[in-house]
Amino acid sequence: MSNTSTEYDAVINTCKGLFIKKTIDYGTAWRILRPESITDQIFIKAQRIRTLEEKKISKVGEDITSEYIGIVNYCVIAMMQLDSGPETPLEILADDVSRMFDEKVKETKDLMFAKNHDYGEAWRDMRISSLTDLILMKILRVKQIEDNKGQTLASEGIKANYQDMLNYSVFALIKLTP
């Protein structure tokens, strides 16, 4: 029997560990990124995963696990940027980044459990390649919403799409864990 909460937390701990180490190394240089640039970074990672899934060979030595971790972390960055205004400094202390990371993940995990209740953990029976395709679809949705200056008529907003992408990436990472 699986324990989704424990598995989710283990994946997030890995992602956050790398995120905080990079924050210590690089500071919060990601704060300079505009929302569209973050979306494009996620697109690049998801497209690389799809290419690796199809070609089965990596010529740069990084596997899809590192790309899914990157998607998780860029989704957290995107949500932090959505909440940041012009008054938010470019440099944020690592302790504050850690707290912000935890807030975004908690909101996203809560959403996942609400959806899991309704969908009955259907993701466990999905192929990892389908999770990749769902992430790519969500990216295209976000790009369209960005092109529409954030306006939607009947759709969830940008943040909800980032949360879904984060959760799909966590699901893939859980499935990839031996």
Image (cartoon, grey):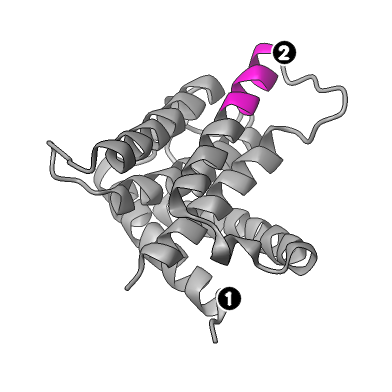
Residue 141 sits inside the magenta stretch: yes
The picture quadrant where one finds residue 148 is top right
Question: Is 59 situated left or right of 95 in this image?
Answer: left
Q: Foreground: 150 or 30?
A: 150
Q: Which residues are magenta?
A: 140-148
Q: Residue at x 45, y 53 (%)?
A: 128
Main SS type for the magenta part? helix
The residue lying toward the viewer, choosing from 20 and 35, is 35
Q: Residues within 10 Å of mark 1 (few under 14, many from 20)?
A: few
Say which mark, if any, is on residue 26.
none
Counting residues from the start of the chain, the first of labels 2 and 1 encountered is 1
Q: Position of residue 155 (x, y in %)?
A: 81, 31
Residue at horizontal 45 percent and vertical 29 percent from the top? 43
Pick the quarter of the image with the C terminus: bottom left
Q: Secondary structure at mark 1?
A: helix
Residue type, label 1? Ser
Relative to residue 148, is residue 109 drawn left or right?
left
Residue 124 within the magenta-colored segment of the rendering: no
Indicate the amino acid at tag 2: Asn
In the depicted structure, whether residue 139 falls above or below residue 171: above
Q: In the image shown, does 170 or 125 lie closer to the viewer?
A: 125
- Residue displayed at 46% across by 41% down: 74
Pointer 2: residues within 10 angstroms few (<14), some, or many (20+)? few
Look at the image and tell me whether residue 109 can be seen.
yes
- For label 1, the residue is 5
Callout 2–callout 1 Cβ contact below 8 Å: no
- Give percent across and percent down for residue 33: 45, 25
Q: Write down the residue under mark 2.
A: 148
